[in-house]
Image (tube, rainbow, N blue to C red):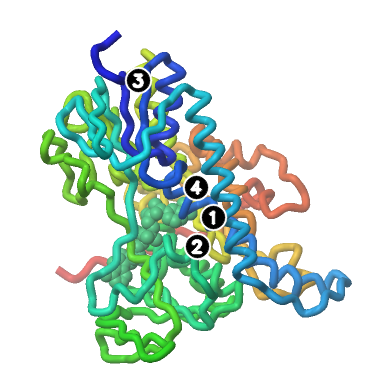
Amino acid sequence: MSAYDYDLFVIGAGSGGVRASRVAAAHGARVGICEDDLVGGTCVIRGCVPKKLLVYGSHVHEEVKDAAAYGWTIPEPTFNWATLRDNVQKEVMRLNGIYKTLLKNAGVELVVGRGRLMDAHTVAVGEKMITTDKILLATGARPWRPSIPGAELAIVSDDAFHLPNLSKRILIVGGGYIAVEFAGIFNGLGSEVSLALRRDLVLRGFDEECRKAVQTGMTDNGVRFRPETELAKIERCGDELIATTTKGEAIETDCVMYATGRVPNTAGLGLEKVGVTLNKAGAVAVDEWSASTVANIYAVGDLTDRINLTPVALMEGHCFADTVFGNKPRKADHQDVPSAVFSQPQMATVGLTEEQARRVYPRLDVYASTFTPMKHTLTGRKQKTFMKLLVDAESDRVVGAHMVGDDAAELIQGVGIAVKAHATKAMFDATVGIHPTAGEEFVTMRTKRPDPKPVAKAAE
Ligand code: NDP
């Protein structure tokens, strides 16, 4: 047994830290973990889980409306924000309890407080000095907002779960995952939502056609887009906020929410003291084994800014623990990671976007389909589902699958297995569809789009 208090000490009990500590303990390591907040991290406390519950809540009004076409007469529903907010928080507290129990049952000791590195083998938590052989940094990331006058009057996603009231009007700044998801939530719950984009399209980095489909669907649902808009200042004026754009336009609203990205939680960790290097993005620089620049110190999750998703942090934490404590060396595989945006309409994706695939594969076949979901043939709701498969014509391999529409996340999870397994289009075609479903479209798309015309070369 080593002379240290622990074989592994983890700073941060979020998805990556908890998974790594439990797996390392199961491999026989003596493990401690520190956390100064609830256990569970961004995903459980102020991210994926409470967000998805709010998404469910925000869909109810349209289900009630749609019910009429199916013969139901339902009196005009009323909504109580405090009930939804408090019920979501109860669930968060329940999960926090479950996470604590999981740690306890795994034999991981939870130390309450913020950890900071004193040297490569010592972590201070408050007054307590803890010695350890290996250290895992898993402190995640936090919302970032531009520093304009009055920025402190705006909320960020952390605050959105605790609002005393639901604002009548809300201006959301940003066009990423968080902006579009909360736009859908607040719109669905009855607020008037405007989205200020600094460019003209949401969800940069995703397949362009899907981005357009999401933006069109959100517009049809009543979200107002303000493209090419950046804020210069925010001022309070009585009960209202006035957000002034860099072009001088004054936008009156009740609430401004910044969803302009997240930054890794590196401050106060003592990284520079022990020589842990940051990369250009300000994240902890790690190699493919999640090892930092200090031999016994590792880092996983959003703190490393690789792919900032809970399941990826879980994978990185698990691989680290298997490699370092389980004698099972395993690298996290960041290829073909499926993901979803719980916007309304929902979007999910795996593999390359069409723009990326065209750069990699000289002959790319594109299969796409837009249709009205069966449910809405009766409701008359103006809502389309969009699906797209990208196929490398050379190998027949499906290199990208994208969907915008109901249940996109549930469907793409399955399609993700096929893409990960390097399935060919012929294998998709040989799979019998389940009828009637939206998903069968993925195995019945037979007509490829005409190849795009080559871009004419400029005269030399
Ligand atoms: P993103 O990085 O996804 O998006 C940030 C947005 O803010 C972009 O639209 C960006 O615009 C815009 N922006 C940046 N700076 C400014 C500025 N100064 N003024 C105006 N707009 C600005 O960040 P999020 O905060 O939405 O999400 C953070 C991460 O959390 C995501 O990357 C994702 O990995 C994760 N996440 C995942 C979810 C899921 O899996 N469903 C849900 C929520 C979060 P532009 O495009 O022009 O750069």
First in sequence: mark 4 or mark 1?
4
First in sequence: mark 2 or mark 3?
2
Q: Which residue is mark 1?
A: 50
Describe residue 238's horizontal placement relative to residue 346 as left or right.
left
Label 1 Cα neighbours within 10 Å, binned few <14 / some 14-19 / many ≥20 = many
Q: At 49% from the left edge and 47% from the top edge, which residue is drawn?
A: 44
Q: Secondary structure at mark 3?
A: helix
In the image, is residue 136 above or below residue 152? above
CA separation in Å, label 4 and label 3: 26 Å
Q: Secondary structure at mark 4?
A: helix
Quarter of the image where one finds residue 395: top left
Query: Which residue type carries mark 2?
Result: Phe
Label 2 Cα neighbours within 10 Å, binned few <14 / some 14-19 / many ≥20 = some
Query: Which residue type carries mark 4?
Result: Val
CA separation in Å, label 2 and label 4: 12 Å
Q: Secondary structure at mark 1?
A: helix
Q: Which residue is mark 4?
A: 44
Q: Which residue is mark 3?
A: 323
